[in-house]
Image (cartoon, rainbow, N blue to C red):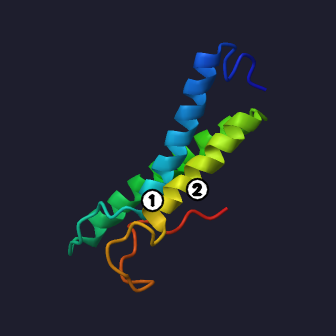
Amino acid sequence: MFPGWPGQRFSSYLSVLASVFLVALAIEWLSHARLIKPSTNYVAVGFQQTVMYAIRVALAFLVMLAVMSFNIGVFIAAVTGYSVGFLIFGSQVFKKSKVEPYENLSDLPPLNC
């Protein structure tokens, strides 16, 4: 499907794995980030949320295309990136205080499969 990808040399293969990992990590960060300041201008907030959602979906599709290379290393890098991203940004492991389940919602709804 993708001839010559993820590369013939070991260094290019490692850079592909690192890139897929980082993009998956970025998707999880976007999924749990609070980047939009609360405002009374609901239209502006809605447009900001839409742009963030479009970026998140585009990155998720890029990871999906990478996984469709049917390379087990790329698949493991994607799953690991999503898992580490959730551990850092979504779980309670690195939260300083206990938060009620719906107290600190992110700007975007969860990414559903």
Residue at 75% in and 18% down:
3
Which secondary structure lies at badge 2? helix
Name the residue tied to disc 1: 88
Q: Residues within 10 Å of mark 2 (few under 14, many from 20)?
A: some
- The location of residue 107, given as percent across then percent down, is 38, 67
- In the depicted structure, whether residue 28 falls above or below residue 11: below
Q: In the displayed orientation, state which residue is furthest to the top.
A: 9
Q: Which mark identifies residue 8?
A: none
Query: How far is mark 2 from mark 1, CA to CA?
Result: 9 Å
Q: Under tag 1, what secondary structure?
A: helix
Q: Quadrant of residue 47?
A: bottom left
Which residue, given by chain and number where applicable, does mark 2 sit on? 83
**Could you tell me residue 53's position as x and y percent?**
46, 56
- Please indicate, yes or no, whether residue 10 appears anywhere in the rendered image: yes
At horizontal 71% and vertical 35% (from top left) the residue drawn is 73
Residue at left offset 37%, top offset 82%: 98
Q: How many labels does the image show?
A: 2
Q: What residue type is labelled 2?
A: Ser
Residue 69 versus residue 48 in the image, above or below: above
Quadrant of the drawing holding the C terminus: bottom right
102 shown above or below 84? below
Q: In this view, does 68 lie to the left or right of 87?
A: right
Contact between labelled residues 1 and 2, with CB atoms less than 8 Å apart: no
For badge 1, the amino acid type reads: Ile
Residue at 53% over, 54% down: 84
From the top left corner, tell me how far across and down residue 90 is, in percent. 47, 66
